[in-house]
Every structure is written in C-alpha cells, then in structure tokens.
Image (cartoon, grey):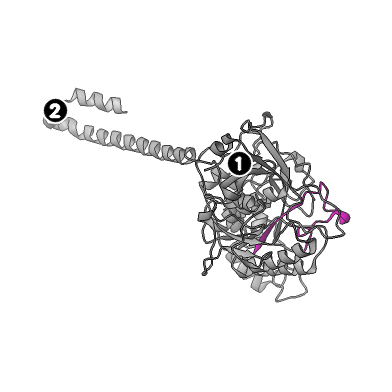
C-alpha cells in the first residue's frame, strides 16, 4: 500500500496543478496513512505485550513456569490479568517469616503498631523464622518478583501476615493449642486467606470451631493434604483439617512432581482432597536472604493459596466456597489424579481467572428468576418452607489444556555439592498416640561459593 502511494506521488509530482487528480489522490492518500497508522499501532501493542512477558526473568521455580509436561500453573499468563493486591491479607500460619528477606520484606502486612504478625510459641509480636518452613511457604505464595534471583510468588503483590504456632521442641498437644490460637488471631486481625500447612490424624473440636468461625467470617483456609502416602478418605487415614467435611471454607491440596504425577509421599482422597499443585524440589525463599528447595504438600498448598489471592484480588466479593469452586472447576485434568482427588487435576491460574467471569454470571439471578422466586412457592422456601430450594449446578468449565507428555527430561540444577538435611514432619501436631509420619519436606542447602552467585542476592 505504501509503495503504491509513493508510485502515485511519482506520477503526479505537483498536485497543486492537477486539481481534477488531486481530489481522488487525497482520498487515496488518507486511506494509505490510515492503514499505515493501524498497522504500526497493532505492531507496537503486540510488541509491548510480548515485552511485558519477556521482561519476566527466567523463573527458577518450575511450578511457575517450565517446559516439562506442561506441569506449571501458568502463572506468567495469569499475571497479564492479575498480580494480587496489597488489600488482600494472607496469613501464613507456620514457623514464622524472615522479615529481612529482600523478596519478602516489601510484601509484609503490618498493623497500626507496625507489627507484621504474632509468635504464639514465645508469645510476642513479629515472629522470626528459625526453622525455614514458613519463609519458604511465604515465598511461594507471595514473594516479590526478583529478576536477579529468579524468584516470584504466585501473587507477587499480596500482603503477607506471619503467625507462628510451630516449634520443634514443643509437644504435639502444645503445637495444636498454639495453632488454634494462631488461626483465631489471623481471623481477628483481618486475614482473608489462611495458608495452613499443619495437620494431623486426630479430630479436634477446638480446631473445628475456630475453622467454623473462619467460615462465618468469610475466611478461606488452604490446607495441606499431608505426607503419609495414603488415601485419607479411609476412616483410619483421616487427616485434619482436610477431613472436616462439613466446612466449605477448607481447600485441601495434594502435591505433584514436574511430570504431573502424584508425589509418592503425598496423601490423596476422592472426597477429602480438592486439587493438586507442584510440590517437589520447589525453590523459594529461606532465612538470611537465601533460597532453598523443599518438597511436600506444604509447598503445593502455597501455590493454591497464591492463586486464591489472585482471584480475591480480582473480585473482592468472592466467598470461600466460590474460590474453591472456581479453582476446582478450572484445573488441568491429569490421568494420574483421576478418581484420586475431587477435581482430578492440577490448578491452572490462567484458567481460574478466565473462568471467574462466567462463574459470577452463573450466580447472578435474572429478573425472571427474581420474580418467580417471590411468586412461586416451589422455588421460594420462605413461601413454602417444606419445599427445598433447587440446587443449581455450576457452569460447565472450559476444556482442559492438552498436556505434552512427549518431553520427559528433568530440568538440570546447578552442579553443586549438596548437603541434604531431612527435617521432621510438616508443622504438624504429632500427638502422643499418632503414628510416626514420613518426612514432609526436604531442604537442600548449597554450600559452595557458586551458591552465592547463583541463588543469593
């Protein structure tokens, strides 16, 4: 089009003296410039979109992005829609948080006294993490995007509240009592979502009551399925809080590896466990500004907590049951999870955010429905209390993405000398009569000088 326009300019070099030719050439010239402007605008817009994705650093947390079996949660694409909000407070009920970590310090919630949380082990404000687990979980769900370390949380603009309940030196009963206090403190201090990695095989009336209180306050609790390698639907294998079946604000999470397979250590349950997320060798933040890998359902839980924060940031009116439904109905279906967990799949942050709009539309009553509910006793229980309201099924979710199963190569980590330290069970209760659980997670500390160049700020 531009070449043709230049050619016409050559044929009529001085249009001032060609009045009959000028009129149609002016129209043609205007059309040419309009086309050129449109093409250039589209090119600039597309380039900007590509740069915004390309500007995201190479992420070293494979759960956020990897090229292996489409096993990540599609976080980068989801960030084009939502990155989180400082108004959404997520409580990490765990071992505390390192408040000086460069990837966490800017995202810490603080109350009007400048406190970022409470320590129920030492009964004081501002719980520091001497264990490592809480800092690691906090990084997965809400670390700032760090181009140097390659670390980012699923919701990199969220506010993180630290509440410590766990101590390795405390008894199982003490940890349970402290966890109940910690949950209640998080509820009373404004948390909208609670990340709770702790758990155990015994029912607790007090824990159930505080979680019921959370439900009444509209607080979602994302809980780890546990690491006992068992089906928690069986009565002898029940794992709480995931096994509190009457609560609609509990979202229970199993763990998968980079090949979309359920971790051998992870619990599962067709009724008790809702979704799965990445949980093996997850690189995240650690105390003293470091970065380490951990494995377990605790890590998987943090991914789902971050996703929940993205959804709530996008729509503040969502209730815990809404968030759970959206996440469950927008998973990537996996053969290995079929008939093993409620959703049968792995969470997908992009699909969850895309599904949000249609989900909300399905919940809004039409004018016809509103009038009918007032006139027809068959659909209005207030007119006829003996008639139960009709249960509306949720909208059919979008089809699952095709999973590329042809690639089986595991991503290589830096060739460093490692010293492995296997830690005890997830911040769990470990009551006196509870059978011994398998290790919940594994920390790999890289001790060489190369470590500081690769992973430290």
Residue at (62, 39) in percent of width and height: 62
Q: Is residue 280 above or below residue 16?
A: below
Residue at the spot of label 2: 14
Q: Residue at x 66, y 39 (%)?
A: 71
Above or below, 312 relative to 76:
below
Q: CA distance from mark 1 to mark 2?
A: 64 Å
Q: Which residues are magenta?
A: 218-246
Label 1: how many Cα within 10 Å (few below 14, some 14–19, many 20+)? many
Where residue 35 sits in the image (x, y, percent)?
A: 33, 35
Quarter of the image for residue 45 reads top left
Among the two numbered marks 1 and 2 on one chain, the one whose residue lies closer to the N terminus: 2
**Does the magenta segment cover residue 244?**
yes
Quarter occupied by the N terminus: top left
Q: Is residue 306 left or right of residue 224?
A: left
Instruction: Look at the image and tell me whether residue 191 can be seen.
Output: no
Magenta run includes residue 170: no
Q: Which mark is residue 61?
A: 1
The residue lying toward the viewer, choosing from 258 and 419, is 419
Please name the predominant secondary structure of the magenta segment in the image. Answer: loop
Q: Nearer the viewer, residue 386 or 127?
A: 127
Residue at x 57%, y 52% (from the top left corner):
142
* Mark 1, secondary structure of its residue: loop
């Amino acid at each position: 089009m531009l070449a043709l326009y230049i050619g016409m300019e050559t044929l009529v070099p001085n249009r001032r003296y060609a009045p009959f030719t000028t009129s149609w050439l002016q129209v043609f010239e205007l059309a040419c410039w309009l086309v050129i402007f449109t093409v250039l605008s589209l090119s600039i817009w597309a380039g900007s979109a590509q740069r915004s994705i390309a500007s995201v650093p190479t992420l070293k947390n494979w759960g956020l992005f990897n090229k292996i079996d489409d096993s990540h949660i599609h976080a980068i694409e989801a960030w084009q829609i939502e990155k989180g909000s400082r108004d959404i407070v997520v409580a990490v009920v765990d071992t505390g948080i390192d408040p000086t970590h460069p990837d966490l310090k800017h995202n810490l919630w603080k109350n009007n006294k400048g406190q970022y949380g409470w320590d129920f082990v030492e009964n004081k404000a501002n719980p520091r993490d001497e264990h490592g687990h809480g800092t690691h979980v906090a990084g997965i769900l809400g670390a700032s995007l760090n181009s140097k370390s390659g670390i980012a949380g699923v919701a990199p603009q969220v506010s993180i509240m630290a509440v410590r309940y766990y101590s390795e030196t405390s008894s199982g009963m003490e940890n349970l009592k402290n966890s109940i206090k910690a949950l209640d403190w998080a509820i009373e201090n404004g948390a909208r979502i609670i990340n709770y990695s702790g758990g155990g095989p015994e029912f607790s009336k007090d824990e159930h009551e505080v979680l019921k209180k959370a439900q009444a306050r509209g607080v979602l609790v994302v809980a780890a399925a546990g690491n006992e390698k068992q089906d928690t639907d069986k009565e002898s294998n029940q794992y709480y809080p995931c096994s509190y079946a009457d609560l609609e604000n509990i979202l229970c999470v199993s763990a998968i590896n980079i090949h979309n397979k359920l971790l051998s250590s992870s619990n599962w349950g067709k009724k008790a466990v809702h979704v799965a997320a990445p949980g093996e060798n997850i690189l995240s933040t650690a105390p003293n500004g470091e970065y380490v890998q951990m494995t377990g359902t605790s890590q998987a839980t943090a991914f789902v907590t971050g996703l929940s924060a993205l959804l709530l940031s996008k729509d503040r009116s969502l209730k815990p049951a809404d968030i759970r439904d959206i996440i469950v109905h927008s998973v990537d279906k996996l053969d290995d999870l079929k008939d093993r967990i409620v959703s049968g799949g792995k969470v997908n942050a992009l699909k969850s955010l895309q599904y949000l709009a249609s989900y909300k539309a399905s919940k809004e009553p039409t004018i016809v429905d509103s009038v009918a509910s007032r006139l027809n006793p068959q659909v209005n229980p207030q007119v006829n209390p003996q008639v139960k309201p009709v249960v509306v099924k949720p909208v059919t979710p979008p089809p699952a993405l095709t999973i590329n199963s042809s690639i089986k190569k595991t991503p290589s980590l830096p060739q460093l000398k490692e010293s492995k330290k296997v830690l005890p069970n997830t911040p769990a209760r470990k009551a006196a009569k509870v059978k011994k659980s398998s290790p919940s997670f594994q920390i790999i500390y890289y001790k060489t000088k190369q470590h500081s160049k690769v992973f430290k700020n």
